[in-house]
Image (tube, rainbow, N blue to C red):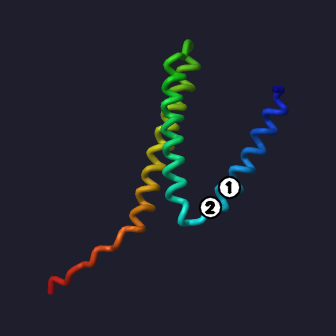
């Protein structure tokens, strides 16, 4: 494929992704985040595998940056999911000590 076709597909995927994510209801947000975290885990493993085959310093640097960013993204997703799940837990009653 030529560069213009690839750029067109990329731009269209941005619009489709925005429309899909913006239409997600609040109830489905947590399961969607969990699925996204699984995908980020796969991306992290892929970045590690690709970086292990790096032959030059530039490739190794870009691979290391990809590993760090994907790890931050994955951990951040789990933190957000955990905080959202805390919203559904029943609140504990505080007893009076008077």
Q: Nearer the viewer, residue 78 or 68?
A: 78
Q: Which class describes the residues within 10 Å of circle 2: few (<14), some (14-19), or many (20+)? A: few
- Location of the N terminus by quadrant is top right
Q: Which residue is mark 1?
A: 20
Residue at point 47% right, 42% down?
72
Q: Residues within 10 Å of mark 1 (few under 14, many from 20)?
A: few
Which residue matches tag 2?
24
Residues at discs 1 and 2 in contact (Cβ within 8 Å) = yes
Residue 71, compared with residue 32, is above or below; it is above
- As drawn, is 30 to the left or to the right of 97? right
Q: Judge by depth and name the residue closer to the eye, 64 or 9.
A: 9
Q: How many marks?
A: 2
Task: Quadrant for residue 7, please give it.
Answer: top right
Question: Where 23 sits versus 57, above or below?
Answer: below
Residue shown at 49% from the left, 26% from the top: 48
Which quarter of the image is occupied by the C terminus? bottom left
Task: Label 2, secondary structure: give it.
Answer: loop
- Location of residue 19 in the rendering, given as x and y in whole percent from the top left corner: 71, 56
Q: Position of residue 92 (x, y in %)?
A: 28, 74
Above or below — where is 19 with respect to 2?
A: below
Relative to 11, 41 lies left or right: left
Q: Residue at x 83, y 26 (%)?
A: 2
Real-space CA distance between mark 1 and mark 2, rounded to the nearest whole angstrom: 7 Å
Residue sitting farthest toward the bottom: 98
Q: Position of residue 84 (x, y in %)?
A: 45, 62
Q: Secondary structure at mark 1?
A: helix
């Amino acid at each position: 494929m030529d560069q213009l076709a690839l750029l067109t597909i990329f731009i269209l995927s941005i619009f489709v992704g925005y429309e899909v994510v913006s239409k997600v209801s609040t109830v489905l947000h947590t399961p969607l985040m969990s699925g996204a975290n699984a995908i980020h885990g796969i991306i992290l493993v892929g970045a590690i595998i690709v970086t292990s085959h790096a032959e030059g310093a530039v490739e190794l640097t870009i691979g290391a940056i990809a590993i760090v960013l994907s790890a931050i993204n994955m951990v951040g997703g789990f933190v957000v999911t955990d905080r959202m799940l805390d919203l559904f837990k029943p609140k504990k009653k505080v007893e009076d000590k008077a």
